[in-house]
Amino acid sequence: MTARLPDTALDTTRVLDQVSQAWDSDIVARLSEYIAIPAKSPAFDTDWAAHGYLETVVRNTAQWIEAQKVAGLTLEVVRLPGRTPVLLFEVASTRNASDTVSAQTVLMYGHLDKQPEFSGWRNDLGPWTPKLQEGRLYGRGGADDGYAAYAAIAAIQALQSQKVAHPRIIGLIETCEESGSYDLLPYVDALRSRLGDVGLVVCLDSGAGNYDQLWLTNSLRGMASGVLKVEILTEGVHSGDASGVVPSSFRILRHLLDRLEDSATGRLLPESFYCPVPPERMAQAQATADILGDELYKRFPWAHYDCGGASQFALPTTTDPLQALLNRTWLPTLSVTGADGFPEMKNAGNVLRPYTAFKLSLRLPPLVEAASAVQELKALLEDNAPYQAKVTFEGGGGATGWNAPSTAPWFEQALNAASQAHFGAPCGYIGQGGTIPLMNMLSTGFPKAQMMVCGVLGPKSNAHGPNEFLHVPYAKKLTAAVAQVIARFP
C-alpha cells in the first residue's frame, strides 16, 4: 500500500474551518453571480448556443478553478460539435507512485445548466435574483447544481493544505443534465480513456433527508416523459352549438389517462412499471423513516384553506413515514407538468377547443428500463382512440433509474466517520425520487466503483420550483465531509 499519512493526520476541525472560510469569502459570491445568469438547459432554451448563457457559466467556473492554483491541476473545456460544453479538470495524485491502487481515480460530478424560472416566487425573490438570507442562498441553480464544481475544488484544497495525500481526481461538469444528459454519453465515450480506472464517484447533485447529518443517496428513480395530444377538430367552434355532438378533447384525454392511472388512488395500472424493493433498500428505508418521521410529508408546501373558521390542510397520499418514503423512491408515479391548447382565463370564450395536450412525466422505479416504458406508454395511449380522435404520444425521452452497488466496508466507515466529525450523527441512507442519468451510465461503465451520491437539496430547498435555495451551513459541512471521504479512499 502507499506510504501516506494515516486518517488521524487529517485535522477535521481545520478542514471545516478552511472550507467554511472559502464559502464565506468567495464561493457564495461566485454562486450569486452564477444565479444571476439564466443558463437554462437546452430543453428549455432551444437557442442556448446563440444566447451564450451556458458558455458564460462554464467560462466563469473554469476561470475561478484556474485562479485557485490547485497543485497538479489541469483544466479544459471540451466541446463536441452541436453539443453543450463540458468542463473537465484533473488533479494529479499525490500518493506514492509505486502503489498500484493509487492509480485509481476519484470522479467528481456536477452540472451548470438550470431548470426554467417557474412561477410563485416570493415578492422579494426571483429565479435570477440571488439573495442570502439566514444562511440560505436563494435563486435558481445554486443548489441544483452550480455549487458542485466550487465545493469539489474547496474539498481538494483542504486536503492539499494539510499535505494529506490524495488519489488522482477528475472533475466532470456538464451542461445538459436538466434535459436528461443526452449530450453527456457522447462525451463520456470520447473521454473514457482520460477518465481512467474510476474507483469512487462523488456526485454532488442529490438531496438530503435533513440538515443534521450526511446523507448518501442509495437509489434514484428513472423517468419516461412525452406529450400526449388529442385532436378532435381542425378549429375551435361555438361551445353552445357543438357541445353534446362534438366530444371534448379534454374528456377524451382524461379517459386515456384512466388507462394509465387510477385517478382515485394515483396508482399506476400497468404492472410492468413496478419492480420489487431489494431487502437492503427496504431495511434502509425503515431506518430513514424512523429518523425523519412525519417530516417526510410535512416538509412540502401544502396549500391550505379556511373551512368554517378552522384551518384545514391538504392531506398527503399517506401519513405512514415508511410508505411515504417508498412512494417517492420505489413506486411509479404520474405527473402532468405542462398543458397546451388552453387559452388564458381572461381570453377563454365559449369555444369548444380543437385539441388538448398534456406533458406527462412518469417517474419509474430504479430497476425499470425507461426505453421500454416509453414505448409501452405510446402503445397504451394511442391504441383504439375514443371517438376516432387523433391521438398522438410523442416521447420526450427516458432515463433509467439507478440502484447503488453494495457498500464496501471502507466506504461505509468513511461515510460514518465524516458524518460524525462534521454533524455529530451517523450517515443516513435515502432514495431520491428524481433522476440523475449519469449514475446509471457510470455504474455500467465502472461496476466496481463506490458511489458517493449526495447533495444539498434538503427540506424545503425546492429545486425546480419557486424559492429554491442552497443551505450554506449544510454545504460547508458537506464539502468538508467529501474531503474526508476522499482522504480515506484506499
Image (cartoon, rainbow, N blue to C red):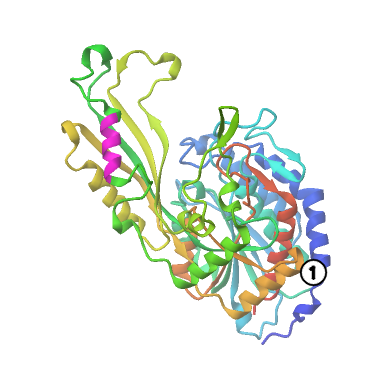
Q: Specify whether 338 is left or right of 480.
A: left
As for residue 196 lying within the magenta part, the answer is no
Q: Quadrant of the C terminus?
A: bottom right
Q: Specify whether 114 is left or right of 142.
A: left
Q: x, y percentage for residue 448?
A: 50, 76
Q: Specify whether 200 is left or right of 350.
A: right
Amino acid type indicated by mark 1: Thr
Secondary structure mostly taken by the magenta-highlighted segment of the chain: helix
| Vertical order, 87 against 480 (above or below) | above
Q: Tag 1's secondary structure?
A: helix
Q: Quadrant of the N terminus?
A: bottom right
Q: Nearer the viewer, residue 411 or 440?
A: 411
Residue at 53% x, 64% y is 285
| Vertical order, 167 against 322 (above or below) | below
- Magenta stretch, residue numbers: 251-259
Dot 1 corresponds to which residue?
12
Residue at 72% x, 63% y is 155
Q: Is residue 102 visible?
A: yes
Label 1 Cα crowd, 10 Å radius (few <14 / some 14-19 / many 20+): some
Q: x, y percentage for residue 408?
A: 57, 78
Q: Specify whether 154 is left or right of 372.
A: right
